[in-house]
Amino acid sequence: MEFMGYRRANGKVGSRNLVAVIPSVVCANDVSEAIVNQVSGTRGLFHHQGCCQLPPDLVRVTDTLCSLGSSPNVGAALIVSLGCEGTDHERLAETIAKTGKPVEIIHIQELGGASRAIQEGTDLAQKLVQKIADQQREACDMSEVVMSIKCGGSDATSGLASNCVIGYVADKIVDLGGTVVFGETTEFIGAEHILARRAVNEQVGQKILDIVAQMEGRAKSLGCDMRKGQPTPGNMAGGLTTIEEKSLGAIVKSGTKPIQGVLDYPQMITNEKGLWIKDTPGREPEILTGMAATGAQFMFFSTGRGAPQGYPIMPVVKICGNVNTYERMQHDMDINAGLIIEGKKSIEEVGEEAFAMAVKVLNGGMSKNEAIHYYSSIDIHCLGPVI
């Protein structure tokens, strides 16, 4: 089976052909946003990191930005540097350039301030857009798909319907030779032993248990029990009573295939196939960044209460398990899995509908969040304090 994608110089395949405008530090966000507002075909990766952080986090931020800029959905990149940040903006430019993409970099301080940087950046961004505009889609095998998955704004319908639909598609993608990545380590709690039993070997199983223990340990270091923040108030209002109940519903979206390994947060998929875990938090801006950094061409996002946001360089398809939410938020939700709850369709029927939507998005069809430009929420998950 095939889809029409953008073949990059390094062999990767994208579903989009965008110019990413990447501030290397939070201080460059406003200049970056002004450039994006001026030039069609660009998307900004506006984050809040890059300075006054401990060295391991500065490396983590640089690594994550490198992976984002290397995403196959990105055809070219403009890096906007302040000039005195803690991230390694030169390594960022070099890493993206190694993928064969056109890359430009500007330094706000060297150019004489924000207004001049905006003018220079706008000119360069326009040239980059024009440079990649003639790239054509070509036939690509479904084995080259990298799909990321998440659930958010969950209620009791999520684990019974929308997560089941995503699990159905996840199994289908893996059977076609593709790659599926899921995360939300906080939402493994109480079900991590089930995931560990699905690991391909004992080492991977232990790693799954370890990342859950580490996530809980970070909360305990602040005198908190992770379970006091999960389920969230919205989850409980939607009928989820315990963290174990939430986790059992959440892991359904991973399907049934063996888990091949655990990826670090900034890590990009190279030639890995099958089902993988990425160690991420559950909050949308941070996990969507981690999943876009895998090189995923798109994401399936399950929701019951209605989570409308997307991501700048990764289409996000919303699978809604609650028919009332779908009807109320139909301009944000892409697939109505609530029909399963009503008994009008089976998991398999909605699963095939969702798979068809995935192929459509891979071929260039818009998800609803893309159509309304709801895709600016982004942040990078860091481990230490801002200092």
Image (cartoon, helix red, strand yellow):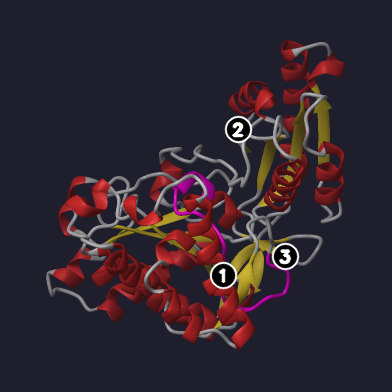
**Distance from label 2 to label 1 (Cα)?**
28 Å
User: Where residue 44 sits in the image (x, y, percent)?
Assistant: 61, 35
Q: Which is nearer the eye, 48 or 19?
A: 48
- Dividing the picture into quadrants, the one containing residue 276 is bottom right
**Residue that numbered label 2 is attached to:** 48
Q: Is-magenta flag for residue 309?
A: no
Disc ID at residue 12: 3
Q: Count of labels shown?
A: 3
Which comes sooner in the sequence, label 2 or label 1?
2
Residue 24 visible (yes or no):
yes
Numbered disc 3: secondary structure: loop
Disc ID at residue 210: 1
Q: Is residue 217 left or right of residue 121?
A: left
User: Where residue 355 sits in the image (x, y, percent)?
Assistant: 41, 72
The structure residue drawn at horizontal position 60% and vertical position 35%, both measured from the top left corner, is 47
Kindly report which numbered mark, 1 or 3, lies closer to the viewer in this rendering.
Answer: 1
Q: Looking at the picture, does residue 224 appear above or below residue 6?
A: above
User: Where residue 157 sits in the image (x, y, percent)?
Assistant: 22, 64
**Distance from label 2 to label 3 (Cα)?**
29 Å
**Distance from label 1 to label 3 (Cα)?**
31 Å
Residue type beneath disc 2 = His
Label 3 Cα crowd, 10 Å radius (few <14 / some 14-19 / many 20+): some
Which quadrant holds the N terminus?
bottom right
Tell whether label 3 touches label 1 (CB within 8 Å).
no
Which quadrant holds the C terminus?
top right
Disc ID at residue 85: none
Tell whether label 1 touches label 2 (CB within 8 Å).
no
Label 1 Cα crowd, 10 Å radius (few <14 / some 14-19 / many 20+): few
Residue type beneath disc 3 = Lys
Q: Which residues are magenta?
A: 269-286
